Amino acid sequence: SYFVGGNEKYPNDGGFALKGWRKCEVDNAAIYINGNTGTTVGNVILTDKDGNVTVVDKTWTFLKDADGKMRIMAHHSSLPYLPDSPSQITEAEVLAAQEGWGEALVKIATTFDTQGLPAAKTLAAEIVDAAYGYQAGPVLFKPTLATGDQTFRTTREGALAYFVGDDAKYPNDGGFALKGWRDVKIENSAVRIDGNTAQTMGWVIITDKDGNVTKVDKTWTFFKDAEGAVRIVSHHSSLPYTPAPAPAAAPAPAAVASAPSAPVAQTITTTIAVETSVAFGAGLVVGGLVGHFW
């Protein structure tokens, strides 16, 4: 049942031998012989028709019976044990990478102020190579002050131009890292760890040499590679959303001045003597109450 399935007594068996295997190699670590039994331990390497390889740990005990036939008497098979990956990223490493990013931004700015653009560009190139994962592929970098067709900087060249400018291919880049920054504080809303990657979301508060403060919304994804280096593979930055001010309340309509109405009783008394005046007086009463038509 295990090898070919199709047995209702073993409903979980899909047929291990039916998985398209095309090659089987046995790599013994040791063989122990004891009379008519032999025990082996090692790896079995299986390759399927698509070239996928599966390695299993294997222990067999073989028995040679009276007729000289070799039969398996014990068979233990398991997938190799995989300890926690050394590339498992920790929150402490993530926070250290964030702090390092802030320190690097300040260092580029102060280098520019004291040594000029060439020195700042050289330093920025070293920092981009160390902090970002461009050597492994595109980085999903959306800077704060990038726009148009150059909003997204998925290449090293684009990232470097954003930080220090001086690249004719990116004429709108003035060099974000050259703006006199002196302090960077990071306030994470949350940090999510998943194996060798981590995502953070929160605010970055940057202060320049004149004391001006800029606050940006920031989302990073950090990746810890096989050598243990933590690098940025996704970086989204934007200015905080500012809602439009509420429209001013419309002014109240001006009151319309009107003459006071004559007392009802007085109007009727004045007009009761003459029949035609009664009708006219009643009109005054109605006009006075409704809208002062006179």
Image (cartoon, rainbow, N blue to C red):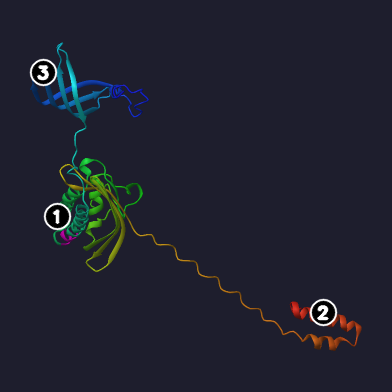
Q: Earlier in the sequence, mark 3 or mark 1?
A: 3
Contact? badges 3 and 2 (CB < 8 Å) = no
- Reading the image, the residue beneath label 2 is 283
Q: Could you tell me the amino acid type at mark 1?
A: Ala
- Reading the image, the residue beneath label 3 is 36
- Reading the image, the residue beneath label 1 is 119
Foreground residue, 99 or 56?
56
List x then y, in percent, for residue 144: 31, 55
Q: Which residue is drawn at 26% across and 52% down?
A: 162
User: Around disc 2, counting alpha carbons within 10 Å, would you say few (fewer than 14), some (14 to 19), or many (20 or more)?
Assistant: some
List x then y, in percent, for residue 179: 24, 61
Q: Earlier in the sequence, mark 3 or mark 2?
A: 3
Is the stretch drawn in magenta largely helix, strand or loop? helix
List x then y, in percent, for residue 35: 8, 19
Closer to us: mark 3 or mark 2? 3
- Describe residue 3's horizontal placement relative to residue 123 as left or right: right
Q: Could you tell me the amino acid type at mark 2?
A: Gly
Task: Give residue 136's quadrant in the image.
Answer: top left
Foreground residue, 55 or 7?
7
User: Around disc 1, counting alpha carbons within 10 Å, would you say few (fewer than 14), some (14 to 19), or many (20 or more)?
Assistant: few
For the magenta stretch, what is the residue range?
109-113
